[in-house]
Structures are given as structure tokens and as C-alpha cells.
Image: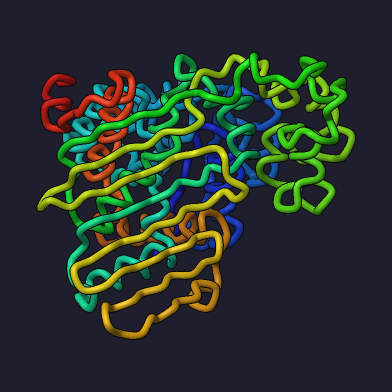
Amino acid sequence: MKQYSVAIAGLGGRGLHTYAKYQEKFPDRMKIVAVADVDAEKVRYAGEKYAVPSAYRFNSAESMLACDKLADVMIVATQDRQHREHAIKALEKGYDLLLEKPVAVSASDCIAIRDAAVKAKRLVTVCHVLRYTAFFRTIKNAIQSGEIGEPVTVNAIENVGYWHQAHSFVRGNWRNDTIESPMILQKCCHDFDILSWLTDKRCLSVSSVGSLKYFRSENAPKGSTERCVDCPHVKTCPYSAIRIYFENDEIGFNNGNRFWPCDILVENPTAETLMDAIRTGPYGRCVFRCDNNVVDHQIVNMNMEDDVTVSLTMTAFTAANSRWLKIMCTRGEIIADQAKNLVTVTPFGGKSTVYDITKMTDDLSGHGGGDNKMMTEMFDALDCHGDVSSSIEGSIAAHLTAFAAEESRLRGGEKTEIAKFERQTV
């Protein structure tokens, strides 16, 4: 097996805290040789941690891409609106890519990257990590076995989770579609991809409704303030930054978490630096007084090939951050609960089989083990000049579904045909 050299453009939660860490687990497969970010502290930290020579520590992706090709693979994990420029330039330089989703923030930019990848004849692995998880591969295998027939109807719920909505889509980078992208794209291009993959059907048309209902100034509690640290509701509001980042059972600093999302507020958080970030930074703002405009709930109805129908609900108003599916087939059904890591397959007239995913894999880290598995399969594909499950062509189809869903929502739920939407985009 070959060790591949890797350059990372973008040292945020994904570039630094997910993909770079692959080297720590599999040093025989990956060696970071160049890093780039506009945050000098992140560049210094990554450079020192992974022994990147100072000459290959760049203050921007643009300065990295101005050089001759530096590595076998470039990880493009910059901000969504930068992906088109960075990905196409990297492809022209001869890099194979690991490209963070969403691929881009407009349908035309997504198509441009897809076409550039085809022209360059380079491997582009899009970070649709759900395809690589034991959870979703168990569902896929159950369908492919034929025991429960063919899928006809699917109900899917993207449980965003109240604290994740507050972190990413009210206070965070993806709060406003003029800064980044519509939430249905950012959060659910994963879902559109996995639903098409599981059913093995293309989406033909969509209709969608949804809105920003709750995280608005008129819903602020009486007497609340601009920042959580000064607010009289700090101990009772579930969206209190102190309750989320310090006290939350799952991700709170007081419960031992030193990683995402705490490390988004400050690198290598301590109690003092985390509190200071809440006191002065964007993640300590009142959720009812931010500049957010993306939805907090949305439903998409999808008409697939062969009369298969899919309903996807995305909502902020859930306790857990997970996905749930019910796949109804001609001879049985599947109920899959990602929060419990259980997949239940029930043939009509037969006994249910329950698959406990925790007993089927020894890696339930990032995205249920999908992050590491995706990178492993990317390097394996490079070894044999093959392809990956989450190729650029399949990914763009999911992105177009998301863009069409947002167009439908903005038009009051009007049916939008995917093929027509793509033709109009090109």
C-alpha cells in the first residue's frame, strides 16, 4: 500500500479536526505535507502537530494553489462559497480531491466542478460520509438481499437537534444563505444522496415547504439580553450558550468534551478560553438576536424513478442529533434509528431481525465511522485507479435535488422537475 501525500486547504472543524486526524490512525496511508488557512493560529497548530515544514504552511488556499503541485491529494475544506475556485484550480494542477460537501453553493458552480473533474480525469471524493457507515450499509444490504422486495415509500427525518441548530444554523457559519448556502443544501445534501443510494433511484421532481419560524427577535424571552452571559434566562433557556457548551450531557465541556463543537469556538479549549469565546464571540449571542435567515424546519416530497416516493423532514426541534428512516417495501419494511444504532428488518408475515450496529463495527467515531472509512476507500481507489462510492457525478445529482427543493420552497411548494431545473441552470 502506498502512503499518499496530502495538502489541506481549510483548517476548520472538518479539515483539521476530522480529516487531518486520519494520519494519526493510519500514518502508513497519509502524510500531511502542506496546510493552508486564513487563521494563522490554526496554521501554526497544524504545522507543528503534523511536522509540516514552514515553507509549506500557507496563509490562504489561494497562496497554496499558486505553487506547483505539492501533494498527491488536496483536501478542499474551505468555506462553501470558495469551493468552485479552489476545487477547479486544484484539478487543473493535477490533484486528486477530497471535497467537503456541499460541493458548492449554487447549481451552476456544482456543475462546473463536476465538468472540470471529468475533463481533468482526476478522482474526486465528495464527503457524503453516510454511504460509508455500517449503519447505512446494513440498510443497503437488507434492500439488496431481495428478502423484503423493492422500496416503494420512504419516510426520513433529519433530526438536526436543538443545540446543533443553535450552533451551526443560528449562531454559526451556516446561519445565513447570503454568507454560505441554504440549510436544505448544507444539512441535507447528505440525505438526498443517501436516499437515492438506498433506493437506487434518481429523483425526478420535488415539492417543498418550510420557514424560519422560531429563531426570530419576536420570540425572545421577556427581559433577555444580546448575549447569554448577561441574560437572566441563562440557566433556563435550552439555547443558552453556557448550557450548551459547558453543561450539555453529550457535548459539554464540563462532561469531558474538548472537541467539536467546543473546539470551533476556540482551539484546544480550556474553561477560561471557552467562556471568553462565549463572552465575546459569535457563539455567545442570543439565538433570537442573530443575523440568521435559514429555515428551522422544512419538508421535501420527492418523486423518484419507478413511482417510488420519499418524504424528508428536516427540523431543528428535536432532542437528539440523528437520522431516522422507515423504508416500506413490497414484501417487508425497515425501521432504522441512528440514535439507537438499530436497524430492524421485518418481512411481511415473518419475524423481525434487529441489527445492532454497535456490535458490527469497532469504529463509531465521526459520522458513525463514515469519516475514516471514506478516506480509506479513497486511498484504496487511488491504489487501483478505481472509483469511490461518493463520486462527483452522483453527488451533483443530490445537490441539484437540494437546490430544486429550495426553489420549490421559495415558490410556495411548487413542483420542480430536476431535469428542467438542470437545463435552466446550464
* Residue pictured at 85% horizontal, 24% vertical: 229
* Residue pictured at 58% horizontal, 35% vertical: 165
Point out the image quarter for the C terminus: top left
* Residue pictured at 51% horizontal, 30% vertical: 296
Quick check: 176 above or below 402? above
Quarter of the figure with residue 288: top right
Quick check: 275 above or below 337? above
* Residue pictured at 85% horizontal, 35% vertical: 235
Side (left or right) of 256 relative to 201: right
In the rendering, at what x and y percent does residue 121 appear? 20, 41
**Residue 67 in view here:** no
In the rendering, at what x and y percent does residue 295 appear? 47, 26
Q: So how many labels did they put on this image?
A: 0
Side (left or right) of 258 relative to 117: right
**Residue 254 in view here:** yes
Q: Nearer the viewer, residue 374 or 146?
A: 146
Quick check: 52 above or below 388? above
Quick check: 4 above or below 149? above
In the rendering, at what x and y percent does residue 53 appear? 61, 38
Q: Nearer the viewer, residue 176 or 78?
A: 176
In the rendering, at what x and y percent does residue 74 appear? 42, 39
Q: Nearer the viewer, residue 345 or 123?
A: 345
Point out the image quarter for the N terminus: bottom left
Scheme by which the image is coloured: rainbow
